Each structure stands twice: as structure tokens, then as C-alpha cells.
Image (cartoon, rainbow, N blue to C red):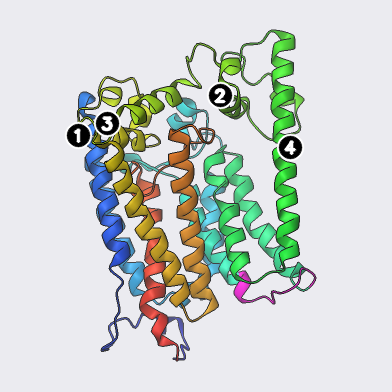
Amino acid sequence: MNLRTPLDYFRVFRPTTRERWDWVTPVGILGLALFGIAFIYSAQLERHGDDWIKQVVFLGLGAIIYTAVALIDYRFWLSVAHWIYLVCLIPLVIVLLPGVGGATTEKWGASRWIPLGPLGTFQPSETAKVAVLLIIASILIRSEIGTVKQSVGALGKLALAVGVPMLLILLQPDLKSAIVLPPMAFSMLYVSRLSARFFGVALGAFILLVAVVTWDSYSYVQFMDRHGYSYLTDRGKYEAQSFVPLHDYQRNRILAFAAPEKIDPKGTENTYNLTQSLISVGSGGLMGKGWTKGTQAQLGYLPRSVAHNDFIFSVIAEEKGFLGSLTVLGLFGLVLFNGIRIAGLARDRFGTLLAIGVTVLFTVHVFVNIAMTIGLVPITGIPLPFISYGGSFVLSCCMLQGLVQSVYRFRKDFT
């Protein structure tokens, strides 16, 4: 089918006998959303929080967005990808302006949210994920990809397109939202059949980066010990001494994972959340203690400020045990493997790139979030899709999965 104008992409109500909806992913999302609502409620039960109600509202809006995006031919987004990218960069700049962050800047020490009055706050980094996905796919579709020499122009454009929003996000600072972008970009490059030499160089660069961060962490420890500074109360002292663009609280998180006895021997701050999370997961057993019966979240040992978002998997593991955790992992597996299946069903590169990019982005979120709750990776604050509390995050997840549904719905328009 030849689409000649942007309006053609909105012709969604066409008589057809062909299968038009994939129901596997929506069923998986619904199951995850129900888990999220139930355990946000449980995590806030003792303080009578109403965030579970807000989550229901967010999910309702997300369902509308999901359906609307799924009804639009995904090839429409190719025609407007550059405009969406530019529009989504504007909030990333605005949030850095003095005074825009308001109380959130003062409370959390970061400018990540734009206040929207009674509507709450908006996190620009979430819409940036969608914009980066579209711009990467757009550049790859319009470029010749093969050997590294042939792909230099496209790689330069990609580096700029991904690097600008990453830099703006890191300036907030928001490391967790920035680190999910490179895996998505590399996965999309991989399915574009870029030369293996490029990925060898990229692996070398990653190893070099790890080495630099390791050296920086060691230097940080030496500096703090030499001057007798406290890791908890004298944060910021080392930042001016290092060329690595990390804040001291981020270095503390790395050390809390690598050397907890050094950074926080009494478990008063950096290792506290991890310790309580491990107790939550470990005490759940096979069947769990029962919904709303978990002691860690209910008694506040697992801080209520993080129990319903970053560490909600710990609440699930404690209250529903190994079987409940396995059910959540199974639902995520359903969504992720179905995303790969849809990428394989796509009959054009753009559809494949969108489906793979979204699936890898979700995979990073799921792996890092669950891994940090059981001590496998440093605590980053990455939320769990459709389960963790958060308006902007829920809406962006629904939009991204709507794109995958659109790829499935319109794949047969190719002959």
C-alpha cells in the first residue's frame, strides 16, 4: 500500500478479514498493572496513601494513549520523528532553568520535574525516551548501513541525536534515565546489520569507561580518607577534584555496592535500603507473608518513600514470595518475548527497529530494577514498568508499547 499524505496514516477503520490486534502484550500489561495497583496500595497502607488511586488514573490515561498510538499507522511517526525530537528537547532544557524545579529541586537535589500545579509534575526524560527511539529509527532508515566506513555519517548523526538528550538528562542529574538510552541505540544498530568491528570498538570503549569509573571511585576513597571527610556529610568535596562527571552521591552508591563496609559501615544511608530490600526478598519464602502482611514495608523498615516505586519488587517478593515474584517475571517475559516476535513479524526495517528498541528499553528497566533490589547491581532508582508508581513513566510505557502494537496491526499492509 502506498501512503501519499500524512493523513493516510490515520485511516484505521478499514474493512478487513485480517487479524488486527495482538492480545498477548495487553494481557501481560494488564496483569502487571494489577500487581502495581495492589502493591502500591499495600506499601502505603499504614500511612493511608492515595498513590494507588493516582496510579489507576495514570493507567486509565495510559490505556487511552496506548489505544490511540496503536490505531495510527506506525509509519506516520517516521514523517514527524525530527519534529517530535526537537519538541521533546525543549522540556529537557526548561527543567534546568533556575526555579523551574521548585520544591522538587530543593527536596531531592535534582531538577528532573516540571511542576504542573494540581496535575502534579512532569518528567521530561520520559518523553525523551520516545523521541530518541523515533529519531534513531528515522536516521537508520534514511542512511546506508554496512561497514563502519560506509556508516560514518549515520553514526555521527546518531551520536549527536542520542548524546544531546543524554547530556541534558545527566545535567539534571538523572543517571538512571540516561543509562537506558545506549542499550536501546546499540540494539537498533545491531539489527541494522552494522559491521561487527563497530561493536568490538564499542565494547572496548565500555571496558575503558568501567576502568575510568573504577579508578575514579578508588581516587575518591583515597581523597576522602586522606582528608578525614565523611562520605555521608561531606558530599561534594571531591567533585571539583575529578574530571569524571559524577556527583559524590552517585559515587557513594557505587561504593555502597562495591564496598558497603567502607562507605557506610553502620548502614545509616546508602546501604540501608539495599539491606532492607534483601530482608524483604529473603523473608518471603515460597508463598509470602500475605498481601498487606509484609513487615518490612508495613512497619517502615523499607522506607515508604521508595517502597511503592523503586523497591516495589521487594514488597511483592515479601508478601507473595517466590511464586509471586515468578509470576511477575513471567508476565514481563510474556511482554518482552512478544515484542521480539512482533519485531520478527514486521515487514519493513522501521517496524523492526521500533519493536526491538522498545523491547530492549523495557528489558533494561526490568533487569536493572530487579537486580538492584537483590544486590546484583548498584542502586540506580530505575522503576519497574507498569508496576512502580509514577505518572510520566506509566504514560511513556503505554506510548512505547502502543508503537509495538501498531507495528503488529499494520505489518500486513505490505505485500
Query: Quadrant location of the N terminus?
Result: bottom left
In magenta stretch: residue 218: no
Q: Is residue 86 visible?
A: yes
Looking at the image, residue 271 lies above or below residue 175: above
Label 2: which secondary element: helix
Q: Main secondary structure of the magenta part?
A: loop
Q: Locate residue 129, reporting x and y percent.
A: 50, 55
Q: Which residue is mark 1?
A: 291
Which is nearer the eye, 46 or 105? Answer: 46
Of labels 3 and 4, earlier in sequence is 3
User: As drawn, is 336 to the left or to the right of 43?
Assistant: right
**Amino acid type, residue under disc 3 in the picture:** Ala
- Mark 2 neighbour density, 10 Å: few (under 14) some (14–19) many (20 or more): many
Quarter of the figure that contains the C terminus: bottom left
Q: Amino acid at mark 1?
A: Trp
Residue 14 versus residue 122: which sits nearer the camera? 14
Q: Which residue is mark 4?
A: 211
Q: Secondary structure at mark 1?
A: loop
